[in-house]
Amino acid sequence: MAYVDNEQEAVKKTLEGEKSKLAQMNFAQKAEYIFSYYRIHIIIALVVIAAIVYIVHLRLNYIDYKLYGVIINSYQYDESLEDTLPELLGMGKHEGVSLIAGLSGDSESNSTGYYNQIDLYTISGQMDFAFTDDDGVQYLCDLGTPWDVTEELPDELLELWSDREVSFRELNADDDSYFDNYAAIDISGTAVHDYFGLDDNMSYLVIVGNPSANEYMDDFYQLLIDIETGKVSK
């Protein structure tokens, strides 16, 4: 038999009155009474608690990506680096490195209606460096985005890679302008190539984003030096 509430509903319920009524009920009656009169309050309380938990979770676990690397024309790389690189680069607790693989350097995938992923990452500033093959270098050069590696990379690293090819690429022959920088450096067979877990056709390192605008690019270059000299290894 359901509990009958004789208290006038127009009168504001008091805590003492509610406690007294609940004391007279069995478990089933208590559950039915609470659900009948307080379900909206319970739902609101649960929503508020969930919102608080979500906000706290975000504040404790959010990542502000400070350095962006991409792998063009390959899906292979060492995914664990996203966890280890931030500490090696001296980043803060909530700062991170984003590594995205599988971008396509196929110019046919770009059209007037849809932009290639490389274009989107470049325009949005989410590409600081790239590992890629000849086609990827050419695609980036056609965009006009790479920096001259002979001017950008530190002398110590260039000396370590002194026997490496630096690649020059022009824009399309029917274009009036030319990309006259050394857009990429050959890293095949280097310690850096092995450290990042790249597949064999990922032969080049390209610097894409504005290095002077990124506080961690110098630390990234130093990490490459430390990898090549054996100071940092897995």
Image (tube, rainbow, N blue to C red):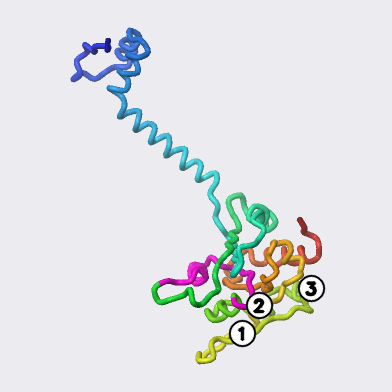
Give the residue at mark 2: 184
Give the residue at mark 1: 169
| Residue bounds of the magenta highlight | 114-135
Question: The N terminus is located in which quarter?
Answer: top left
Question: The C terminus is located in which quarter?
Answer: bottom right
Q: Residue 145's x, y, as percent?
A: 55, 77
Please identify, in this view, whether the residue under mark 3 or under mark 1 is nearer the observer.
Answer: 1
Q: What label sits on residue 160 in the rendered view?
A: 3
Amino acid type of the residue tagged 3 in the rendering = Leu
Picture quarter containing residue 212? bottom right
Q: Nearer the viewer, residue 67 or 82?
A: 82
The span from disc 3 to disc 1 (Cα, nearest Å) is 23 Å
The span from disc 2 to disc 1 (Cα, nearest Å) is 9 Å
Q: Residue furthest top?
A: 24
Q: Residue 183's x, y, as percent?
A: 63, 79
Amino acid type of the residue tagged 1 in the rendering = Arg
Identify the residue at horizontal 65%, vertical 84% (top origin): 168
